Amino acid sequence: MSVLQEKKVLIIVTAGIAAYKTAHLVRLFIKKGAEVQVIMTPNAHHFITSLTLSTLSKKPVYTDFFEKDNGLWNSHVELALNADYIVVAPATSNTLSKMASAEADNLALATYLSAKSPVFFAPAMDLDMYKNASNQHNISILQKKGDIFIPPASGELASGLEGEGRMAEPEEIVAFMENYIRKSLIFFGKKILITAGPTYEAIDPVRFIGNYSSGKMGFELAKAAEKLGAEVVLISGTTAEQLPKSSSIERIDVVSSAQMYNAVFQHYDYTDVAIMSAAVADYRPKNVSKTKIKKDENTFTIELVKNKDILLTMGERKKNQFLAGFALETDSEEENALKKLEKKNLDIIILNSLKDNSAGFQFDTNKITIFDKEKNQTQFELKSKEKVAEDILNFIHSKTQKH
Ligand code: CTP
């Protein structure tokens, strides 16, 4: 999945010949699943039409503070704050200079100056102009301020001269931004292992012992972890949940607790963070009938044997992994959760109380309390499982900083 998916990208197009390439740039961002807003400087219209860019971005393109037809104000502040990322491409000598000196004589510059989100800029100019000390000085001012410089390429320039100054190709701009954003995500370079859903323990070829776990919480955790930059392995019991097609999460489907155990320990040694949200059956039938059991008797007894506790074993074998378990309780919630935290050698335990309405199995919402090793507890409101997943991962991140 691209880190640009569902992100709002504001492209500021300024007046250089490379502006013609921004049609392709808009298309590439759209293909990555981003929402694109274009602002053009007045002179950029000499190089590409706003009709082209608005058709491709599926949004009006803005240039003026006031719309001539209806007198409506295009708020530079709103445009700036609405963007997750801003990219100035092409960034001409004129615009770079105004960006560096905080001149706001058009909507594009006023928006740039109001930005709180990361700003990338891709200069485009002729080789000597690019080498000019004033331009180099402005580029370094912008970099010092925190803007991100996308270096121009060397090659044939519109003037016919050869050298450095050609705007990076749209593909390079997008790849540069994706790479930069990925590296800034809180779980970049981390491997997160998540278990989800129920386990089914076979009785005979057509029956099993299972539970009502839907797998929703684990799937939301996996999706959120991927969005935060982690490499994710999701080990799931039987579920109707699906991952988006664009996802890069490694999904491993299992049925029984024994299969989940084996899958977990194939990955555990290389895991940084493990979050065990699966509802693993504590027992399984001692003998699994090879043939369908007939209803010959009036009463029927199944002898059960204990399953291995996956999380307990992980706690015992823990090296540097951060371990998060779940506790689903109906009574003495805090006491039971803390006992599990200690017994299983966890870093945190996430408590779902079945006393809370709309929380736990089958629901789209959840209400959790997180306990840490120091017995601190953090309570969260009832939220969608998507938001709960973000809360859990942000909490883990804050803990791993001290870990
Ligand atoms: N867990 C596990 N392997 C098991 C059982 C549980 O990994 N065989 C994990 C769950 O994924 C969850 C936590 O352990 O993160 C739940 O702890 P557990 O003590 O099993 O909870 P309950 O099954 O609710 O235990 P009890 O019935 O004793 O309350």
Image: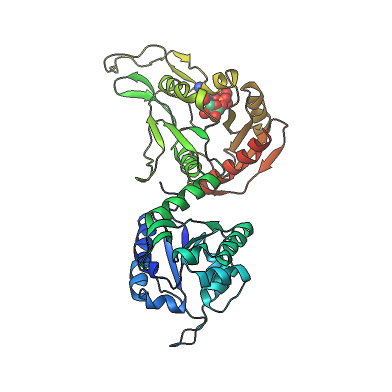
Q: Is 390 drawn above or below residue 371 in the view shown?
A: below
Residue at 58 percent of width and 49 percent of height: 382
Task: Indicate left or right for 179 with 325 as reference.
Answer: left
> Camera-side residue: 225 or 36?
36
Q: Residue at x 36, y 67 (%)?
A: 158
Q: Quadrant of residue 260?
A: top left
Task: Give the camera-side residue of 36 and 131.
Answer: 131
**Horizontal placement of 107 versus 290: left or right?**
right
Q: Position of residue 36 (x, y in %)?
A: 42, 64
Q: Examine the image and state in which quarter residue 287 appears.
A: top left
Q: Residue at x 52, y 44 (%)?
A: 183
Does residue 363 lie above or below 234 as drawn?
below
Question: How many labels were placed on the picture?
Answer: 0
**Residue 325 placement (x, y as % from top left):** 57, 30
Residue 221, horizontal then vertical, whole percent:
50, 40
> In this view of the protein, can residue 212 be seen by the observer?
no
Kindly identify the residue that appears in the image at 57 percent across and 41 percent down: 393
Q: Picture quarter containing residue 292?
A: top left
Residue 311 percent coordinates (x, y): 54, 23
In which quadrant will I find the C terminus? Answer: top right
Picture quarter with ligand 1 = top right
In the rendered image, is residue 195 in sight? yes
